[in-house]
Amino acid sequence: MSEELKEKDESLDTAEATENTSANTEEIAVEGASADAAASADTSAEEQTPEQQLALAQAQIEELKTQALYKQAEFENYRKRTIKEKADLILNGSKSAVTALLPIVDDLERALPSMKQAEDVAAVAEGVELIYQKFLKALAGLGVKPIETEGKDFDVDLHEAVAQVPGVPDEQKGRVIDCIEKGYTLNDHVIRHAKVAVGM
C-alpha cells in the first residue's frame, strides 16, 4: 500500500515539473520575441544614414508647413466671412423694424385724406387712437417698452431730471411728479431716458 502511494506521489511530482518547465519555456519565448522586436526597431533606426534621417525630417517639416498654411487660409476665410456678415447685419439689421412699421405708415396714409374731409372730430380722434395703439403694439413686438414713471422713485438709470418741484409732501420727495417726455427700453436696455420732474 505504501509503495503504491509512493508511486502516485512520484508521478504527480513529475507532472508538476513538466508543467512548470513548459510554462517557463513559454515565458522565455515571449521575452525573446519582445527583445527581438526591440532589437529590430533599434537596428532599423541605426541602419538609416544621416542623409536619410535628414530627408525624413525635411519631409515632416514640409508636411507641417502645408498644414499650417491650410489652417491659416481657413482662418483668413473665416475672418473675411465674419466681417462681411457683420457689415450686412449693420446695413440690414433694421429690416425687421421697418417691416413691422410699414403697416402703420399705410394706415396713416389712408387716414390723412379722411381726416381732411371729416367733420366728426370724435371719429378722427378714435381713428388716430387706433393707429397709435397699433404702433405701440408693433414697438412691443420689437422689444421696445415705455419706462414707467408715474409714482416711481427717481432712478438715474431710467430717468433724467429736467425739473424740480419744491414744496411737495414728504412722501413725494425724491419721486417722479410729472413726465415731460417718455423714455423707452429696447430688450431691457435704455435707449432713451424718461425726462421727468422730481419732487424736492
Image (spheres, grey):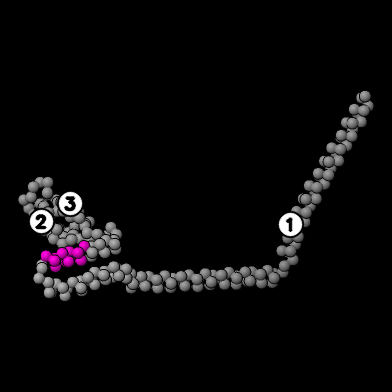
Q: Amino acid at mark 3?
A: Lys
Question: Residue pushed farthest top?
Answer: 1
Q: Nearer the viewer, mark 1 or mark 2?
A: 2
Residue at numbered disc 3: 152
- Our reading of the magenta stretch's main secondary structure is helix
Residue 7: where, in percent of width, then height? 92, 31
Residue at left offset 74%, top offset 66%: 47
SS type, badge 3: loop
- Please tell me in which quadrant of the rendered image residue 126 appears: bottom left
Marks 1/2 in contact by CB < 8 Å: the verdict is no
Residue at the (17%, 66%) spot, across then down: 127
Question: Residue at the location (68% across, 68% down)?
Answer: 53
Position of residue 78 measured from the top left corner of the image (x, y, whole percent): 46, 70
Q: What is the magenta range? A: 122-133
Is the residue marked by circle 3 packed among few (<14), some (14-19), or many (20+) residues within 10 Å?
few
Q: Which residue is mark 2?
A: 164
- Of pointers 2 and 3, the one earlier in the residue sequence: 3
Question: Is 81 located above or below residue 36 in the figure?
Answer: below
> Which mark lies nearer to you, 1 or 3?
3
Please identify, in this view, whether the residue under mark 2 or under mark 3 is nearer the observer: 3
Which three-letter amino acid code belongs to the residue tagged 1?
Answer: Ala
- Image point (57%, 72%), residue name: 66
The residue indicated by pointer 1 is: 38
